[in-house]
Image (tube, coloured by chain):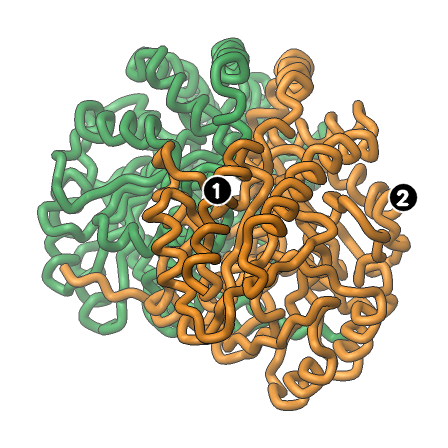
Chain colours: A green, B orange
């Protein structure tokens, strides 16, 4: 039997990150390749206690089928927090639903908005999980160069002018994956105004927003959304647990009604126990205190990695100094063979993610790679950076 | 802002079942409309104990990101059970992955196999969740009449001859949803041979297979699959808990590799805690004993409903006598206004699902509706059937 794969999926290959994750299950590898939050950050005892309480008080609720939109108390909690904690004005046209991780929010809204051949405008580089989802619905990806403070706005307008069939602009405004870059307030406003001018939507993906270690808080694009243009994606993966697969989408109700139909087709509903855990966790804990603990933990790791890189790396190799998140973006001198560098690093037991995992097309030239500081131990950071640093001094 | 919905999604409406489920949250309604397993069937104490143990022994494993294919021990457990318990020979070309409910298995394989305009051949009537998923990828649905022992085989061959772009035949061989009908061994063999002859695949959806109350076990089509034609979907929803959203797909590895890429785009992986719970439950319990308990429970409910219907219903109204599963299919006299009957039933506080939820097209004529006996209490069954019976005697 020959298995004929659909056009939309036939070109898609397994995500380089996932494949590398597998390779790095080898315990002797120091992995800077993951995107995992630190396991030390999981509030295990609190989650255990909450789970016990749920099985004591509402076991049937935790095990029976539930509604596609999500667990009502969690939706209400998140609607309140989006307003009181995340600063998004309450607007009549907006609604909020629960999804199986923000990844599912990307998938479902793409399925509802993008016809084969339509354009999605992305930061270049961008998150591979989103890019692959756009590809899997036959979208044409148009990348807009990412500068230190967000997308190049002239180039964004050019892309919007050129691509009449653009459906939305995909933005990770805080501590972007993979670059670590934060989009400035001015550029957020400019992106919003351009989206309005050209009648395209914005998909604002904000998994890392809570993890700011330095600098000033910047309001979300959703908070400016007086016109109902913004699909906002939030996640519990970085603040509570990624294995639970709980995220949420805040967007105009009219669009979400269709997203709910798509979710019925996809997984009926998100695991109900995990939704109940998230809701109780938010009700029983002060989110800002919990997040402050996470920030302290990651701030140290991030500072350690950057400090070691500043000491060890050849100055010809540049890198971003993110104000938050989990990643930084390291760029070899122009003309360097980045893939060869990454392969050599693995052969010396250090894994990073080659930058072309994050470009619009495999063939786009990049001299960069992504490094994660949240997962490795302090010792691994010091040791791994020493190895990479030595490589940069010898090779360039 | 006008939200332009993609072609694939623009025609799709919210599932009638989900909408009815919401309506039936009114506690005064006796609902025969759900598809829920009985809450009495959930092994709450065992699941609670297992969850405690997991949080004690491997909390990080339960909360951190995991691999897309699924929790390795559960995959191994299920591969063994597919062979030793479900009678599918071990074949080199087959693989098994975990998905977020069998619904996700339907979604992902459809995404990987069906181009817009391709045909999916279905039993008529069939499960609305699958039909909507096929529709959401632009599939053309071709229904083949379901007889008491499965699809009409001549009509199936006709459909395969006529539709050169058919990608697979969707079959629920055991206690079908909505009809309750079981496909005979002869017809399973015939369906397999036709799939082979016309080089199309078979999607065998078997959520109810364990719930047989009478009659002889019939081997799965997957067990005959020497040629690698069959995508087999299994689920923990009916034997353990539907709210956990854990299912599995057994299919040729070559196809599953693409399905895994689609799953990366969809939800990265299935909630890991629930996968661990399923694995431990299967290891710590005798599946056949657990299933025997479920069978006893549902056998009584099914017999009660059928018995009451035989006493109360106008003999002009016919219905199936399923050998298992959760549903039976009730047919009003030809020419009756089925929708009107269903509406009148709700106005008398009894909900059933109108049959056109399960037809290929909304406009297909059907005099039937679906009834569920697993969710209502014994008292509700007696009372609800009395009300419906009176209606049938007065109206026809």
Q: Residue at x 56, y 51 (%)?
A: B104
- State the image quarter where residue A208 is shown: top left
Question: Residue B84: which numbered mark, if any?
Answer: 2
Query: Residue A120: x percent and y percent?
Result: 33, 62
Q: State the separation of the CA atoms marked 1 and 2.
A: 41 Å
Q: Could you tell me which chain the residue with mark 2 belongs to? A: B
Q: Residue at x 70, y 77 (%)?
A: B152
Residue A176 is at least partly visible in this image: yes
Q: Which residue is mark 1?
A: B384
Q: Left of A142 or right of it: where is A135?
A: right
Q: Quadrant of the N terminus of chain B?
A: bottom left
Query: Residue B368: x percent and y percent?
Result: 51, 64
Rate crowding at label 1 as few (under 14), some (14 to 19) or many (20 or more) other CA atoms within 10 Å: many
Marks 1, 2 in one chain: yes
Seen in the picture, residue A240 relative to B394 is either above or below; the reply is above
Which residue ends up furthest to the bottom in the rendered image? B162
Q: Residue at x 42, y 65 (%)?
A: B338
**Secondary structure at numbered mark 1:** helix
Between A390 and B48, the residue placed more toward the observer is B48
Q: Could you tell me which chain the residue with mark 1 belongs to? A: B
Q: Residue at x 16, y 57 (%)?
A: A195
Answer with mark 1 or mark 2, whichever residue precedes in sequence: 2
């Amino acid at each position: 039997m020959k298995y004929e794969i659909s056009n939309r999926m036939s070109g898609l290959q397994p995500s380089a990150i996932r494949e590398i994750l597998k390779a790095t299950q080898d315990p002797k590898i120091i992995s800077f390749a993951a995107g995992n939050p630190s396991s030390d950050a999981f509030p295990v005892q609190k989650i255990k206690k909450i789970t016990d309480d749920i099985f004591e008080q509402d076991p049937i609720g935790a095990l029976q089928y539930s509604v596609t939109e999500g667990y009502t108390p969690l939706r209400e909690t998140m609607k309140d927090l989006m307003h009181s904690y995340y600063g998004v004005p309450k607007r009549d046209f907006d609604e909020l639903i629960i999804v199986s991780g923000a990844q599912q929010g990307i998938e479902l809204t793409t399925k509802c908005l993008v016809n084969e051949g339509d354009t999605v405008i992305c930061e270049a580089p961008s998150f591979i999980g989103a890019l692959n989802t756009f590809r899997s619905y036959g979208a044409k990806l148009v990348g807009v160069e990412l500068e230190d403070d967000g997308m190049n706005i002239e180039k964004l307008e050019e892309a919007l002018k050129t691509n009449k069939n653009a459906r939305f602009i995909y933005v990770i405004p805080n501590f972007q994956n993979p670059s670590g870059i934060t989009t400035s307030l001015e550029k957020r406003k400019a992106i919003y105004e351009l989206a309005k001018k050209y009648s395209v939507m914005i998909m604002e993906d904000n998994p890392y927003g809570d993890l700011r270690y330095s600098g000033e808080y910047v309001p979300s694009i959703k908070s400016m959304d007086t016109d109902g243009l913004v699909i906002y994606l939030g996640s519990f993966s970085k603040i509570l647990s990624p294995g639970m697969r709980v995220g949420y989408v805040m967007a105009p109700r009219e669009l979400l009604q269709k997203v709910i139909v798509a979710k019925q087709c996809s997984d009926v509903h998100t695991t109900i126990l995990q939704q109940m855990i998230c809701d109780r966790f938010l009700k029983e804990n002060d989110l800002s205190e919990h997040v402050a603990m996470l920030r302290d933990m990651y701030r140290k790791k991030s500072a350690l990695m950057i400090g070691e890189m500043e000491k060890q790396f050849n100055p010809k190799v540049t890198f971003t100094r993110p104000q938050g998140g989990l990643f930084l973006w390291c760029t070899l001198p122009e003309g360097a063979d980045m893939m060869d560098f990454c392969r050599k690093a693995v052969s010396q037991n250090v894994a990073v993610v080659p930058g072309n995992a994050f470009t619009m097309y495999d063939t786009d030239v990049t001299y960069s790679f992504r490094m994660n500081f949240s997962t490795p131990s302090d010792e691994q950071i010091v040791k791994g950076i020493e190895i990479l640093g030595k490589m940069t001094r010898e090779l360039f």
